[in-house]
Amino acid sequence: MVYTLQQRTEIIFIYGECGRCARRTAEIFNERNPNTNVKHKYVLKLVAKFTETGSVGNKKRVQMCVLDEAAQIEVLGSFVAEPTTSLRSMARQVGMSHETVRKALKFHKFHPYKMQMLQQLFDDNFDRRIQFCETMTNLINDNRNILQNICFSDECTFFLNGRVNKQNCRYWSDENLRLFRENNTQYPEKVNVWEGILGNAVLGPLFMEENLTGERYLNLLEEIIDSLITTNLENQVDAAGNRVCNKIFIFNKMELHHTIFFLLDSRYTTDFLENGLVEEDQLSGHRDRPI
């Protein structure tokens, strides 16, 4: 039976009152506490513990410390060599517990940083972005209501060939190395999804298993999207860029940051390449540019 600290303290007081007689102490304690059955041997052990430690509480277990200097060096060295290894995988490799490995990394201020997925850009992309902003600013100054008639659309690609899931990818280090991976815009085994926003209305989503070529994009505009939007509408399209064929370049072609302005069936259409926030992609630049 496990006795509380209050009961153990009572036994010590009774032991002193009874002239340090263990048997008499056990009898008196059992009379005062009918639900207990203290033996005189327990009284002697409790008195010996109190004499040695000055406490009736249990001794704290002394845990063997496996996180010595050699273990810390092994853990840190392993993560320097393989920074993307998970904690549990590394724990199995070094023969330690998951918590021990985590404590070693925390002690040395290592942090699980996330890899950034950046879209590849070229040297002239930054100037074209500025030109595009200036052009749109002029259009807005000429017509304050122009944004109400723009269909903002985006094409999101879902890859089926094992693209890196950055939510599950970490690399351990004592400082942020700004690790990123550049992605191309075309991959096999994918599903394209198109969706647009016009005012308070949502157009789509439209699913396309094939690559969005010029012919398919023209058919998408004429056969499907045309029925979803009204006339005299300006359509701003994302991620079609250089893939649009000449058949839809009818009037006033301009290229600004992979941006193409053209008039199609009385629609002033803007086409530019830039992945949106839905795709969780960012635009990469020179290393001296802030991310």
Image: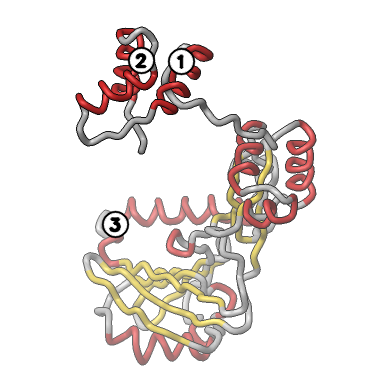
* Position of residue 128 in the picture relative to residue 142 (left or right): right
Residue at image coords 45%, 21%: 44
Quarter of the picture containing the N terminus is top left
Residue 246 seen by the camera: no
Of the image marks 3 and 1, the number of the one nearer the N terminus: 1
Name the secondary structure under disc 2. Answer: helix
| Disc 1 + disc 2, Cβ < 8 Å | yes
Q: Which residue is mark 3?
A: 143
Q: Which residue is mark 2?
A: 12
Q: CA distance from mark 3 to mark 1?
A: 90 Å
Residue at image coords 39%, 85%: 221
Quarter of the picture containing the C terminus is top right
Name the secondary structure under disc 1. Answer: helix
Which image quadrant for residue 200? bottom left
Name the secondary structure under disc 3. Answer: loop
Residue at image coords 61%, 49%: 98
Please tell me whether mark 2 or mark 3 is closer to you in this view: 2
Up the image or down, 50 lies above or below 66; here it is: above
